[in-house]
Image: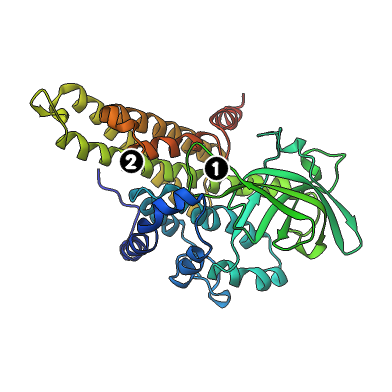
């Protein structure tokens, strides 16, 4: 079925970004997988090329266009070339962190941070999860105690994407430890602040090119001027407001990653022969691939509709949760069945389907687990 989400400007943007990916990411991806991190220069190059901060006003060096379809194009192209891990940091920077700076920064903060975010000189991250608490954010123990014109921050975060590279870390803290949700605030903690330390670059099952770190804060003095929002205690509301876009971004990328795995497998089954004929000619292969193609197409039209709703300001938390839950579960099913059709070769690390299989597993966890998504959807039903 023909897609109608994109217009000529988006397709021209796609062609430019595809050239960027083919020149700046694909030739280096294996090297970055081994290193466990992409170089900071990738962000600077993306910034110079106009692929960061598309919605940032032109006066701060951005594109001045509020249209998530451009983000969607980038997510699709990153998945289409098998660069899920290398591209995750760029998607986090554009899709997930930037909305906080756009929505909650005052004029002084905008002037201080937005130019660097647009240029790639300031890499962003968001730190919510803590060791031992998982999805229960209200139980966080990282505190920010007011001391004159500063907050004194103590605590730790874990599983932080862009954790090694980040210059600006949107950090969820308790400014009132006696409260749960109402005691949360968001502070921007910056590279170089005394007492802000990064732990090891975590060794993961997949997504190897993406740096994921533990962060610790020991008496870090953070200026009150780095508080996002007008007053303390707004952190949970801010997170809830931005989670739909984050979850849509993950779900959208999951559909694109599933399509990439399917295309890999279609190529493979047309060439690989068994019993004197291509394995794609067997009824089982045709049926499996027909099922996957159908499910991916159906999911694609749902997330396309979600993008339209987001741009219209109408995307609900429940609908975004449906996108995240269904599409990441679909991605898992697709890569598993596609690996099976590769046979023993699919288990070999040199085959791209193997990497796609490992990279896919985390998408059902980060950004809110499948179980949390079902909880959000269930509550929307009045249950």
Pick the front one: 244 or 267: 267
Residue where numbered disc 2 is placed = 350
Considering the numbered disc 2 on the image, is that residue within a helix, a strand or a loop?
A: loop
Pick the front one: 238 or 40: 40
Residue at the farthest bottom position: 59
Residue 357 left/right relative to 215 = left
Rendered image quadrant of residue 376 = top right
Q: How far across and down, in percent of the image, does residue 202 sit?
A: 59, 43
**Classed neighbour count for the residue bearing mark 2: other residues with Cα under 10 Å, few (<14), some (14–19), many (≥20):** few
Query: Taking 15 as reference, is 252 above or below it?
Result: above
Residue where numbered disc 1 is placed = 316
Q: Quadrant of the N terminus?
A: top left
Pick the front one: 25 or 344: 344
Residue at screen point 53% across, 37% down? 321
Question: Which label lies toward us, 1 or 2?
Answer: 2
Rendered image quadrant of residue 371 = top right
Q: How far across and down, in percent of the image, does residue 102 sit?
A: 61, 62
- Judge whether residue 377 can be spotted in this image: yes
Query: Taking 230 as reference, is 200 above or below it?
Result: above
Q: How far across and down, in percent of the image, does residue 317 sit?
A: 57, 40
Give the tally of numbered discs: 2
Q: Quadrant of the C terminus?
A: top right
- Precedes in sequence: disc 1 or disc 2: 1
């Amino acid at each position: 079925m023909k897609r109608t989400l994109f217009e000529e400007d988006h397709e021209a943007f796609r062609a430019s970004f595809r050239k960027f990916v083919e020149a700046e990411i694909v030739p280096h991806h294996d090297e970055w997988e081994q290193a466990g991190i992409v170089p900071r220069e990738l962000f600077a190059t993306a910034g110079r090329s106009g692929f960061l901060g598309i919605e940032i006003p032109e006066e701060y060096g951005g594109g001045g266009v509020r249209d998530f379809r451009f983000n969607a194009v980038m997510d699709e192209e990153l998945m289409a070339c098998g660069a899920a891990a290398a591209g995750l940091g760029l998607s986090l920077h554009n899709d997930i962190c930037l909305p906080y700076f756009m929505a909650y920064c005052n004029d002084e903060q905008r002037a201080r941070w937005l130019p660097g975010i647009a240029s790639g000189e300031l890499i962003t991250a968001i730190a919510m999860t803590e060791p031992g608490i998982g999805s229960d954010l209200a139980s966080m123990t990282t505190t920010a105690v007011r001391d004159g014109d500063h907050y004194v921050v103590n605590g730790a975060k874990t599983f932080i994407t862009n954790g090694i590279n980040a210059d600006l870390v949107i950090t969820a803290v308790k400014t009132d430890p006696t409260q749960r949700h109402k005691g949360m605030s968001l502070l921007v903690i910056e590279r170089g602040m005394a007492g802000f330390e990064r732990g090891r670059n975590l060794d993961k099952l997949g997504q190897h090119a993406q740096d994921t770190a533990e962060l610790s804060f020991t008496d870090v003095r953070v200026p009150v001027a780095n508080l996002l929002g007008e007053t303390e205690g707004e952190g949970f509301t801010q997170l809830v407001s931005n989670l739909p876009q984050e979850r849509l971004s993950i779900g959208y990328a999951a559909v694109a990653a599933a399509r990439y795995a399917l295309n890999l497998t279609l190529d493979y089954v047309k060439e690989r022969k068994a019993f004197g004929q291509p394995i794609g000619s067997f009824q089982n292969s045709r049926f499996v691939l027909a099922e996957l193609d159908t499910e991916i197409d159906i999911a694609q039209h749902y997330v396309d509709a979600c993008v339209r709703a987001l741009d219209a300001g109408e995307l609900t938390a429940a609908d975004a949760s449906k996108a995240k839950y269904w599409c990441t579960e679909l991605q898992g099913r697709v890569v598993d069945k596609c690996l099976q059709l590769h046979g023993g070769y699919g288990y070999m690390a040199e085959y791209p389907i193997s990497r796609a299989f490992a990279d896919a597993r985390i998408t059902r966890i980060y950004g809110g687990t499948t179980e949390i998504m079902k909880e959000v959807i269930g509550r929307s039903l009045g249950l």
